[in-house]
Image (tube, grey):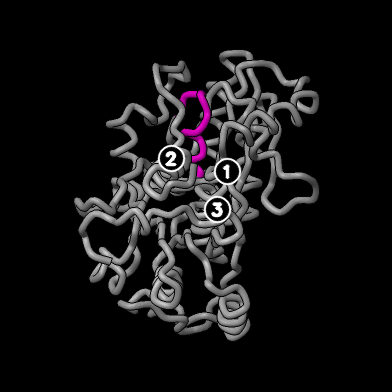
Amino acid sequence: MSDSQPSEQDLAAPSAERVWVLDDPRAGTAAQAIGIAERLGVPFRRIPLTWNWMAHVAGLARWGSLFGLGAAARAGMVSRSLEEAPGPALVIASGSRSAAVALWLKERYGSRIVHCMRPGVGGMLCYSKFDLLVIPRHDHPPKSANVLPVLGAPHRVSPLILRQAEAAWRERLSHLPHPRVVLLVGGPVHGTEMVPALAHRLGKVVARLTAERGGAVLATTSRRTGTEATDALAAGLSRTLHELYRWGEPGENPYHGFLASADAIVVTADSVSMISEACATAAPVLVALPELAGSRHRRLLATLQRAGQVRLLGSDLSPWPRGSLDEAERVAAVIRQRFSLD
């Protein structure tokens, strides 16, 4: 594809059954593509991807490749595309590894590609082949007609999801007083265990701020928090009324229900996904433990702070004027406009 204006034929709407989402096994990566697809208002097909030991070089392919795909995923991709000729009209992908698969589909079928995040070294060398690149502002997107900068990362937490979750959890959380302070706890960016002392300190701070206001804490941990840090967090929260969901415990995960019920949200600085999802609510979003943030996360926080979306956790849980952040819907609107999906 050149950088010239597309023709009317190029802008023909893909039929509903020909919208494919490349489903990367990393949940936070896949959620960006799936979240956008869910907001389009048309049926779509999720194509599960698995990767072999060569997956780390998949993003080097300039013209598209199935290199790095696991054998089953590679066979499934080829057979599915052959069975469903003329193939997908619109492909939505996310992450450098999925970019090579999306480019392969474009080369084979002329599919339109919407890709989230930077598409790897190979993809950036031919980024004009992507019909729309959705790149976070903190990743310094290039200026181009096919590049759409976004705040944070697109995700699946939509207004509809929040309304449904609020209704589903209303009775189950009705015994908890307001203000309800939601605490989202992650862990080291490239690790699996948070230092227990950090978790305990965070729990004590949030418990104190909440108790001073006569409220309750609704806390969740992630796969990166670790058992010892979760226990330390629980000890820190023990002096105030709270609910704590431990990652992986039996029963329904209350994550969406907590978000939908929040009067304020405290989120650790290590997760692009959790920070972005917290900003989808109308509650004030306060970022804790900035020492857990890597360089990319620090850039994310800087962009969100400049936009008035988040503040660092201090002693104030009061709201400030802020609109709910809904980047997945904004991307979907651009797709509908450019590709005539309406």
Q: Against 166, is 249 above or below?
A: below
* Mark 3 and mark 1 residues within 8 Å of each other at the beta carbon: no
Q: Is residue 198 visible?
A: no
Q: Which mark is residue 22?
A: none
Q: Callout 1 environment at 10 Å: few (<14), some (14 to 19), or many (20+)?
A: few
Check disc 2 and give the amino acid type: Ala
In the displayed structure, would residue 283 be above or below residue 44? above
Mark 2 to mark 1 CA distance (whole Å): 10 Å
How far is disc 3 from disc 1 in space, using C-alphas? 12 Å
Q: Is residue 114 magenta?
A: no
**Horizontal arrangement in the rendering, residue 5 relative to residue 58 (left or right):** left
**Front of the two marks 2 and 3:** 2
Nearest to N terminus: mark 3 or mark 1: 3
For the image shown, how many numbered marks are present on the structure? 3
Disc 1 on helix, strand or loop?
Answer: loop
Q: Is the Cβ of the residue at disc 2 closer than 8 Å to that at disc 3?
A: no
Find residue 41 and name its label: 1
Residues drawn in magenta: 274-285
Q: Secondary structure at mark 3?
A: helix
Q: Residue at x 61, y 46 (%)?
A: 221
Distance between mark 2 and mark 3 Cα atoms: 15 Å
Q: What's the amino acid at mark 1?
A: Gly
Q: Is residue 279 magenta?
A: yes
Q: Quadrant of the N terminus?
A: bottom left
Instruction: Give the amino acid type for the residue marked by disc 3 in the picture.
Output: Ile
